[in-house]
Image (cartoon, grey):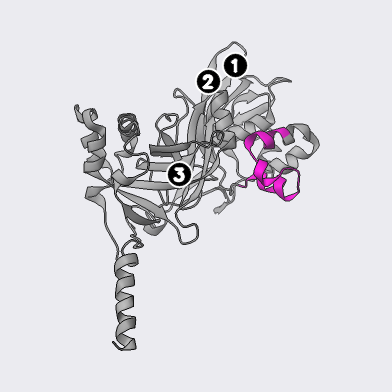
Amino acid sequence: MSLLKIITLLFVLFVLFTGCSQKIEHIETISKANFQKVEMQNLQGFENDNLTKALKVFIKDCQASQKNPNLKEVCLKAQEDDILRDAKEFFLQHFTAYQIVSDEEGKEGLITGYYEPLLQGSYTQTNRYKYPVYSVPKDLLTIQLSKAYPSLSNYRLRGKLKGNTVVPYETREEIEALDYKTAQNLKPICFVDNKIDLFFLQIQGSGKVELPDGEYINIGYGGQNGHPYYAIGRKLIEIGVIEKKDISLQTIREWLVQNPEKADGILNLNQSYVFFRQSEKTATGSLGTELTANRNLAVDRKNIPLGFPVFINTTNPITEEPINRLMIAADTGGAIKGKIRADFFFGNGSKARELAGKMKQEGELFVFLPNNKIEKKD
């Protein structure tokens, strides 16, 4: 056999035995991520998961996500009366599983966690309750670019008008330097007693405030000033006050409390500032539905559209036991950027806070795409 024929044969064998298994599909009408098809029943932990619970959360989130044309048909199917009799069969019949893969990260990415914090506050500003929780300012503009530029449908421009020009909104430091009594566009929902807790409330995106009379009010995400999110833990690692292996919500908070003279300088490195709204609902995600502990994820919507089922393989940050679970993408966050990236919602309470604060695990993500909407690009 000639050398040319041997090379040709080796190439064909390579394509047959590796090319197909490594083929990456790009579902560009639904996501900007790269996908690799997998058999749903081969997903680690799929057979043992409580798929009925997952389907109930999917149906709950369909209240909002069925407005997405890619989910409308399958949401209608999910709401049929007898559908919960066999949740596994529903997902097998109506979805195909695709693993998100990345040229940079391979198949594993970062899975963090968040929770619903509880703060102490008052409707009235006092010597104790002096830090305002602001509602969305009247002059904050959120410009949707999709009508003029369809390719930018996942992007929003935030700022304010200065004359006839849209300019960036104030940074965290600039907003906190303002006096709401004289600033025409800033209106507090309430006031809380801890500036550091307010900072972490903004990172979590929603929470509760307990008033002096024992009443609770729900505070939900309302908007953001448009400046990029900066993880302050990065700076604390850089200056050598916390080791990378020890970084968590708990260690960051402890350092800020112990170094009050330096705290503002560190907090203001994160120029992003979140505004809130008072809500009748408990913790609510970007989808507009109440979040379900251990079944909802915050994602980067450019790569994982809201409302879609996402199977996750990761580990518990405390016990290191596997977490293999079908969840629903229902929220977003300023820090949740990247193809293989998700934020696990743990609920509320001290256990949820501990888990969320320590969650920085590697993990794999598998998006379930509705069979009637899959469009492949060779």
- SS assignment at label 1: loop
Residue 217's label in the rendered image is 2
C-alpha span from label 2 to label 1: 8 Å
Q: Amino acid at mark 2?
A: Ile
Which residue shows up at 78% across the image and 35% down it? Answer: 259
Query: Within the magenta stretch, is there residue 237?
Result: yes
Figure check: 294 above or below 228 = above
Q: Quadrant of residue 73?
A: top left
Which residue shows up at 53% across the image and 20% down it? Answer: 217
Q: Earlier in the sequence, mark 1 or mark 3?
A: 1
Q: Nearest the camera: 249 or 302?
A: 249
Q: Amino acid at mark 3?
A: Val
Which residue shows up at 53% across the image and 37% down it? Answer: 320
Apparent side of residue 247 relative to residue 98 in the rendered image (left or right): right
Per the image, the residue denoted by label 1 is 211
Quadrant placement of the N terminus: bottom left
- Of labels 1 and 3, the one closer to you: 3
Give coordinates of residue 275: x percent, y percent.
56, 36
* Residue 56 seen by the camera: yes
Figure check: 337 above or below 346 = below
Find the residue positioned furthest to the right.
261
- Of labels 3 and 2, the one closer to you: 3
Quadrant placement of the C terminus: bottom left
Q: Nearest the camera: 199 or 37?
A: 37
Q: Which residues are magenta?
A: 230-254
Per the image, the residue denoted by label 3 is 299
